[in-house]
Image (spheres, coloured by chain):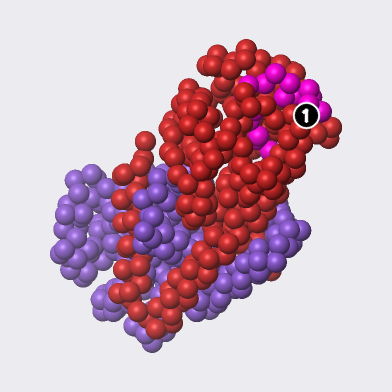
Chain colours: A purple, B red
């Protein structure tokens, strides 16, 4: 499918794309690009056969590549675009895998003055708490969802190529516009992470914190698992989508305020209805979407 | 250890106590008490050998029992005490397994005018989303924590007996006072449940709810799993401990407000520190208490 894929940022996602692409024989050569301080990670990626070579200068990394995947934290994508600009090739297809999309498209607009027609923004709904090339596996995207958010400028040809690429990697593709993606993901992913981080931060500062965690049962552990996610990655994601997220925080505050009032006023039936609605909603959606 | 154990409310917890006590040969006879509308559940419990007999009148149920365990929802415990009052035996030991303890002790005070010295309140930190005798298993309390909250009136003899009983069932015992229990459990269990219910209730009402749940990954599913818990049980628990819970909701609102401000003002470092603190706190406590 491609001659040479260049992965910019060979972490969990970038490394897993490389492994899956190699397994499915979608290219003959895969190289990685990173900063000098990522040398250890890039050496490991190369030793494990995730990439064939790695480079610290972007010119050599993208030389001859017909597919370039940006898999860095979303906070540095604008800088990557600026570095790529001088070596941008019209015959290659470019993509990214950032968890937020409005800011990625804005970063492209800032760097280029427009969004290149051969840049296709995507977001694979897959991941793990672990990070780095060490955590990469070739099945990370198997039967996982992948959202493509083409812009008005994106060419049909580039869109199709990236869609085919991800279908070959095993993902189930959805297409939506950039703003809608950030709106939906704020609810499904960003807000829950903020809730888990804030709950653990709050309880971890309490005098009785040892007891609180000692008597935590399985439900609490599940509930707070995502508070073990990479803090710098989540800082970037939350800042990149802050408008959507702060609105949702406000809505949740209102919901919590309502529940607090129900408790204070012993509104037993209203409280039951709220909990029961939630339980039914969760079950309905599990039935719909559980694979 | 006992001649006859009477389980008041043969659900997941009551049924599992019966199965574990039988397996460990802690008594010769186990009976269940329930309401007429629970007949199907009691028949099932008897057919499965969880209990030897069941009764709809409390007098026959507790006749000759030297151990009585109240395993009903916390909302009806006062009514159970009132029913038990006329048949209360000084030679038996009584216990409950409610998830809140202040209200249970208050219910005893209301029913008796004092807390009987042979009543020992407990709270096993074990459970599941499933409910009813059908879900009962004999290993539910294996290596799980159990909190005993003796009152000033509780006799040493009764306390020791209940402690030994639960040790034989495999639980690891902690003793704390009644108010402290409700303070700690509000943080470790009640608040997370309210958060999960409110998040799912909020998102389940949105126009884009289908998409929100469609693109939910594993983290979100874990995070909201406890929103599938029994709504009437959780209504009772939350109302019973509303003073502690509403204070915590307020504290979490403040924490969310702070994070919202950090996002609005692009306080990148503060946001990172908050997330990083949470991640480290969670890891520290996992290391301390993970079995």
Residue A35 is drawn in which quadrant? bottom left
Q: Quadrant of the N terminus of chain B?
A: top right
Asked whether residue A236 is in view, the answer is: yes
Is residue B179 rendered to the left or right of residue B8?
Answer: left
Instruction: Specify whether residue B64 is painted magenta.
Output: yes
Instruction: State the residue in front, A99 or A186.
Output: A186
Is residue A82 rendered to the left or right of residue A108?
Answer: left
Instruction: State the residue in front, B167 or A149.
Output: B167
The crowd level at tag 1 (other Cα within 10 Å; few <14, some 14-19, many 20+) is: many
Where A78 sits versus A66, above or below?
below
Q: Which residue is mark 1?
A: B58
Instruction: State the residue in front, A105 or B57.
Output: B57
Asked whether residue B74 is in view, the answer is: no
Where A96 sits versus B91, above or below?
below
Residue farthest toward the right in the current orientation of the protein: B36
The location of residue A287, given as percent across then percent down, is 67, 47
Identify the residue at horizontal 31%, vertical 56% (top origin): B280
Give the SS element for disc 1: helix
The location of residue A172, given as percent across then percent down, is 54, 53
Instruction: Specify whether residue A70 is painted magenta.
Output: no
Q: Quadrant of the C terminus of chain B?
A: top left
The location of residue B82, given as percent across then percent down, is 75, 40
Instruction: State the residue in front, B42 or A198.
Output: B42
Identify the residue at horizontal 57%, vertical 35% (top origin): B117
Give the extent of the magenta segment: B55-72
Identify the residue at horizontal 35%, vertical 42% (top origin): B289
Is residue B95 rendered to the left or right of residue B40?
Answer: left
Chain containing the residue with disc 1: B
The location of residue B250, given as percent across then percent down, is 52, 69
Total numbered badges shown on the rendered structure: 1
Identify the residue at horizontal 61%, vertical 42% (top origin): B115
């Amino acid at each position: 499918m491609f001659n040479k894929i260049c992965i910019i940022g060979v972490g969990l996602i970038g490394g897993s794309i490389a492994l899956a692409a190699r397994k499915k024989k979608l290219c003959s050569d895969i190289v990685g690009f990173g900063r000098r301080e990522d040398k250890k990670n890039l050496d490991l990626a190369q030793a494990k056969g995730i990439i064939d070579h790695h480079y610290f200068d972007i010119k050599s990394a993208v030389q001859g590549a017909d597919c370039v995947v940006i898999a860095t934290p979303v906070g540095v994508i604008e800088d990557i675009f600026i570095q790529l600009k001088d070596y941008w090739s019209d015959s290659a297809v470019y993509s990214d895998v950032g968890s937020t999309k409005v800011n990625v498209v804005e970063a492209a607009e800032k760097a280029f003055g427009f969004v290149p027609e051969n840049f296709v923004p995507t977001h694979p709904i897959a991941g793990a708490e672990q990070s780095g090339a060490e955590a990469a596996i070739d099945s990370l995207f198997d039967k996982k969802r992948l959202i493509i958010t083409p812009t008005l400028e994106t060419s049909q040809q580039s869109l199709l190529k990236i869609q085919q690429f991800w279908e070959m990697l095993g993902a189930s593709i959805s297409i939506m516009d950039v703003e809608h993606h950030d709106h939906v993901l704020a609810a499904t992913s960003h807000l829950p992470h903020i809730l888990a981080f804030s709950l653990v931060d709050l309880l971890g500062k309490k005098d009785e914190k040892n007891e609180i965690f000692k008597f935590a049962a399985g439900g609490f552990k599940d509930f707070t698992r995502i508070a073990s996610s990479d803090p710098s990655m989540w800082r970037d994601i939350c800042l990149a989508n802050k408008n959507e997220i702060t609105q949702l925080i406000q809505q949740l505050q209102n919901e919590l305020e309502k529940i607090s009032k129900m408790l204070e006023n012993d509104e037993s039936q209203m409280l039951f209805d709220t909990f029961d609605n939630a339980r039914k909603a969760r079950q309905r959606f599990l039935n719909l979407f559980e694979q």
